[in-house]
Amino acid sequence: MQICGSLEIGEERQRLVAMMESLCQVNQTKTNHNNNTTTKNNNTCNTNNNNGGSNNNNNIDSINQNNVNNVKNENGGGGGGVNNSSKCYKDNQDCSYDPQQRLAVLSFEQVRRLNDVMNEVVCIHGRGNFPTLEVRLRDLVTVVRSKLEQDPTNGGAGMRVKDIRLNGGAASHVLATESQPYNDLDLIFAVELTSARHFDRVKAAVLGSLFDLLPEGVSRKRITTCSLKEAYVSKMVKVNDGDRWSLISLGNSRGHRNVELKFVDTMKRQFEFSVDSFQIVLDSLLLFYECSKLPIGENFYPTVVGESVYGDFQEALYHLHKKLISTRHPEEIRGGGLLKYCNLLVKSYKPALPDYIKTLERYMCSRFFIDFSDINQQQAKLENYLWNHFVGLEEESLKYQYLMLLHSVVEESTVCLMGHERRQTLGLIENLAFQVLCQEQQRLNNQQVTTGPQTTYLYASGFTTNPGFYYAPVIPTACYTCTCTSWMACSS
């Protein structure tokens, strides 16, 4: 056993410390290679100054003190300088990035935002009479990891968690200089999934965690794993063909952030665009929560490493700050990234290279229509995407513009469909667009009318036969009361 301040650390925590040391050493090696003049700080952790140092100081080497940002500032940090020298946009060729370019150490401001995200109380709403689970994200991560690593005889999965990462919109929010809205909290647990039994263990561990998180006073006698799944799990995905990963989405309330737990063994394609390619390793921060009795401060905070699976961290960060769109090989993405691409466009993102992205639009459309070849599948996918990604009045007002952008991209860049299929798909998008416009006009009219009867809008479409759309107000009329008291006699 080793001593961390006044706390004891077991073998598992020692493994996490060693992993964090190796990550810091990789980043320091890159810094020394690029700058050769890295300033050493006598008060910082031995990992940053002495590549590991002595065993007595191994345990708190994740804590930065007094000007630990020297390494980060010289290397650009997570939010510092930008390196655009390694851009590679050639068709059908992979960019050969130095593996060290994928990593960067987060600045204090980014670690502070990460700490805020981890301390955020998430609400996992249950169906029916099941109560809402209110838990901090850091506690949820700790409970799930504990269940995964716990011995099977004690109800755990007996699996080794290699690392835990924050991914998606929340990671972009942490790294961005401006406020970056995000809908879900995406977490990646790196585990081994070599057999169907491992997938079952992961599922049982998550459901067991939900059971442990039930509030006090709830009778647990009749609650089973099946009922917990129906109450709190909104989506479950299992992939074991080539890639091996599973997804369990927690939460059933629209307008509230879902927690998406992804358990990954192998995944070839981990991003759609450069702006959503960030992954933040949480192990050092979780270790800090366990070891330190002091709160995070500017002179006392853990070393947290971020990675861009796009390839070059600084280039992807530049795209995030400047709201630029860049990707590679969209034909490798399920759906081609077409819907996400139009979503970025409607939110004022611009292509990093317009001519190149126009070429990629063809691949996006081709892959989308390969994955969703039937008109019913396309309609279900579009409606589901609108429902999940346009939440709130501000974003709902963008639906019509989004669909018209999508219509324009499909019309200009689709080369894989027959003429009638192409017209059918374009008609579907127009139908959804005008339906959204009708709903928006109804909402705006209801806001303006304060007295008297409200105007009702009717919407009709005939995109399968006649591509004509209209919506017209229905003027309500006064109700006529019949004054007849008896039947009229028949005169014939």
Image (tube, rainbow, N blue to C red):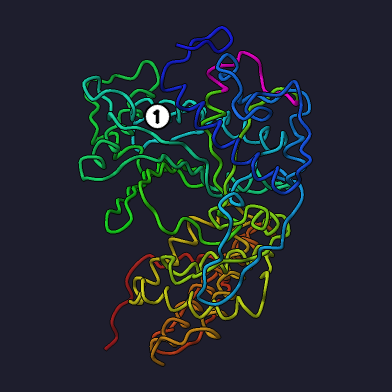
What residue appears at the point 78 percent right and 28 percent down from the top-left corner?
Answer: 67
Q: Indicate the amino acid at tag 1.
A: Arg
Q: Is residue 58 left or right of residue 349?
A: left
Check disc 1: other Cα within 10 Å, few if <14, some if 14-19, many if 20+: many
Q: Which residue lies most toward the top here? A: 6
The image quadrant of residue 289 is top right
Q: Is 195 above or below relative to 153?
A: below
Q: Residue 134's x, y, as percent?
A: 48, 28
Q: Residue 81's x, y, as percent?
A: 77, 50
Q: Is 167 above or below relative to 269?
A: above
Q: Quadrant of the C terminus?
A: bottom left
Q: How many marks?
A: 1
Q: Is residue 226 left or right of residue 111?
A: left
Front residue of 160 and 375: 160
Q: Is residue 476 visible to us here?
A: no
Front residue of 90 and 142: 90
Q: Residue 308's x, y, as percent?
A: 57, 51
What residue appears at the point 74 percent right and 29 percent down from the top-left corner?
Answer: 68
- Label 1 element class: helix
Q: Is 37 above or below relative to 221?
A: below
Q: Residue 430's x, y, as percent?
A: 51, 79
Looking at the rendering, the stretch of residues picked out in magenta corresponds to 288-298
Q: Is 76 above or below relative to 22?
A: below
Asked if the stretch drawn in magenta spans residue 197, the answer is no
The image quadrant of residue 158 is top left
What residue appears at the point 38 percent right and 91 percent down from the top-left corner?
Answer: 418
Q: Quadrant of the N terminus?
A: top left
The prevailing secondary structure element of the residues shown in magenta is loop
Q: Residue under circle 1?
A: 145
What residue appears at the point 33 percent right and 75 percent down from the top-left corner?
Answer: 488
